[in-house]
Image (spheres, rainbow, N blue to C red):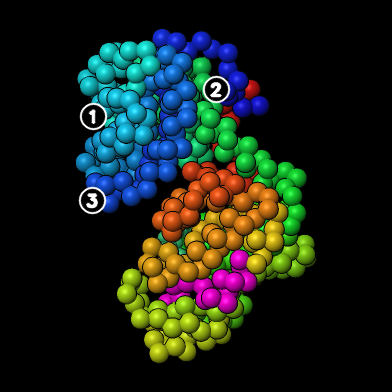
Amino acid sequence: MLRSLSAASEDLSGKRVIVRCDLNVPLKDGEITDDGRIRASLPTIKRLSDAGAKVIVVSHLGRPEGAPDEKYSLAPVATRLEQLLGQPVVFAADTVGAQAKAATKLLDNGGVVLLENLRFNPGEASKDDAERQAFAEQLAAYGDLLVSNGFGVVHRKQASVYELAKLLPSYAGDLVELEVSVLERLTDNAERPYTVVLGGAKVSDKLGVIEHLLPRVDKIVIGGGMVFTVLAAQGHDVAGSLLETDQLEVVRNFFAQAAELGVEIVLPTDIVVASGFSADADHETVSVDQIANTRFGASGMGLDIGPESGSRFAEVVSSSKTVFWNGPMGVFEFANFASGTRAVAQALTEVQGLAVVGGGDSAAAVRALGFDEASFGHISTGGGASLEYLEGKSLPGLEVLND
Ligand code: ADP
Ligand code: MG
């Protein structure tokens, strides 16, 4: 059983509480382009602040190499957090340095401080146990307890996620609790028909989930960049589209397994092929057996599923009772290649049952395409973490919160 903050009987007033959040938001020229992860972190931060705790928020952002790197600073996140929270957030421009020490010491009951990017310190993500332990001990000095609320990192054995949770009394925050409860519903006794929609860039990222979910689902719908490896495995020429040749054999095995289990694999019948990878690329919609026969020849790249596939996918999705969707159907970042993703997203909003969007880019896609988040059963904040959970792996950051 997960030890959760919501079930904890601790009196939080005056306690110094470290909250490990996942505030890893996409930034463009220093501007936050999608603040979903900040908003998802708010209920727990608010709850702690309202209870009179001294709230010390910690997070990572991007993948700096264990040293300060301006472009991965959490400073813009502090500003947005302050706006969304409606109360001051003190930003400390270091993690275990003088600023953080002072700011955490000066906190009033109910006050909130955000420390700089944890990954500016090499100890956070070090492969060396002792190095992580040492960093976790420095962090632990700030707090009386830890609330682990960064669902997007619970699959990582990192100092603030794992070692720190062993050093202090630790609880799962509301977000982690919610994400886990949704994932449980996707793994045990899901209502049928159960459909998994997979897309995104790489097949190799998603193979584990396919393997684990095959015996549990009725249909697997595949689009996005990964579909070209699947189509190639079926003998189609995919021209210049994304292709992972080393995965062809694995994909063929999945087909065999799916056939044995009676799982239907739904693939696109038409593809939008572009002259190249750009927003304004010339493009043509053709059936899957004509991808190499457009006017772009062997350099044509499939950047979206076609309209016929979009309608078919939407039908399959909206008639399901449980849907898990991970990975955009096309390069939704370019308006010309967003239709497939839009069709699937729309269908998820029509599901009479549980419809879950998992994956950082998929979540960003539904917001970028203007969908109301409330019309989905759940939008997960953790791509890798959800996938690993669904793969049946044990996640270090959850394991350490289990009694
Ligand atoms: P998520 O973060 O939701 O798990 P992924 O990271 O696996 O999703 O994949 C997202 C990326 O896949 C997007 O940036 C999108 O542009 C890209 N993508 C989708 N379809 C294609 C395609 N046909 N060709 C190239 N890239 C694609
Ligand atoms: Mg992604």
- Spot occupied by residue 240 in the image (x, y as percentages of width and height): 42, 78
- Spot occupied by residue 110 in the image (x, y as percentages of width and height): 38, 16
Pick the quarter of the image with the C terminus. top right
- Spot occupied by residue 31 in the image (x, y as percentages of width and height): 26, 47
Q: Residue at x 62, y 51 (%)?
A: 355
Q: Secondary structure at mark 1?
A: loop
* Among the two numbered marks 3 and 2 on one chain, the one whose residue lies closer to the N terminus: 2
- From the image, state whether disc 1 or disc 3 is nearer to you: 3
Above or below: residue 160 compared with residue 13: below
For the residues bearing labels 3 and 2, Cβ distance under 8 angstroms: no
Q: Residue at x 62, y 57 (%)?
A: 350
- From the image, state whether disc 2 or disc 1 is nearer to you: 2
Tell me how far mark 2 sits from mark 1, CA to CA. 28 Å
- Total labels: the figure holds 3
The residue type indicated by label 1 comes to Ala
From the image, tell me which residue sits under label 1.
Answer: 93
Q: Nearer the viewer, residue 38 or 289?
A: 38
* Among the two numbered marks 2 and 1 on one chain, the one whose residue lies closer to the N terminus: 2
Q: Which mark is residue 29?
A: 3
From the image, tell me which residue sits under label 2.
Answer: 5
Q: Residue at x 51, y 58 (%)?
A: 327
Q: Which mark is residue 59?
A: none
Would you say 333 lies left or right of 67 here?
Answer: right
Above or below: residue 362 compared with residue 153: below
